[in-house]
Amino acid sequence: MNTMILYGSDKARMIHFLNEVLDFEWNQETDLVSFSNYHFKFLEKSNHSVSKLDLFFWLNSKEELDEVISKFNFYIYRIQDRRVLEQIDFFDNQDYFGVALTDLDGRVWNYGVRKEGLKNHENH
C-alpha cells in the first residue's frame, strides 16, 4: 500500500474536512485517511511549506458532484465560528465540469464529471 505523507497546520481539521466533505475514511488505528486506492497520512507541522498539490477525481454523475458541493457547503456552515480557509471554485470546459475544493493548507481536490454520455447536462 502506497501512502502519501502530507504536512499541514491543523491535522484534525484536515481529517475532518476529507472525511465529512469528500467521504474519505479515517482509520484511527493506522491514522490513515483513505479513498479508493489513495492513502494519506497527515503530519502537523506549525512552520510548514505546502508544495502545490492538485489532485483530480472523476465522478460518475452530476448528482454525485451535487452531493460533494452540498457536503462542502454544510461543512463551511458548521465551521462558521472559525476562520474559513477552505474554498470552492467551479470549472466547466468542453469535455467536463466540476469543482475544485481548496483545503486550509492550499491543496486542491478536484472533482469532475465527463460531459460525454450525460443526459441531463443541460441542467448543469
Image: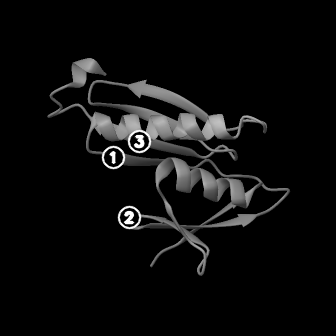
Give the side of residue 74 with respect to residue 66, left or right. Answer: right
Q: Determine whether 104 is above or below 11 in the image.
A: above
Q: Report how far apart the C-alphas of labels 1 and 2 lie in the structure.
A: 12 Å
Foreground: 96 or 16? 16
Q: Amino acid at mark 3?
A: Tyr
Foreground: 2 or 118? 118
Q: Amino acid at mark 2?
A: Ser
* Labels 1 & 3 near each other (Cβ < 8 A): no
Which x, y percent locates residue 113? Answer: 30, 37
The quadrant of the image that shows the C terminus is top left
Query: Which dot marks residue 58?
Result: 1
Q: Is the residue marked by circle 3 packed among few (<14), some (14-19), or many (20+) residues within 10 Å?
A: many
Kindly state the secondary structure of the residue where label 3 is placed.
strand
Q: Is the residue marked by circle 2 packed among few (<14), some (14-19), or many (20+) residues within 10 Å?
A: few
- What residue did someone put label 2 on? 36
Q: Is the residue marked by circle 1 packed among few (<14), some (14-19), or many (20+) residues within 10 Å?
A: some
Q: At 23% across and 18% down in the image, what residue appears? A: 122
Q: At 63% across and 36% down in the image, what residue appears? A: 76
Q: Determine whether 122 is above or below 19 in the image.
A: above
Which x, y percent locates residue 14? Answer: 65, 54
Q: Report how far apart the C-alphas of labels 1 and 3 lie in the structure.
A: 6 Å
- What residue did someone put label 3 on? 111
Q: Earlier in the sequence, mark 1 or mark 2?
A: 2
Q: Determine whether 54 is above or below 95 in the image.
A: below
Which x, y percent locates residue 105? Answer: 70, 47
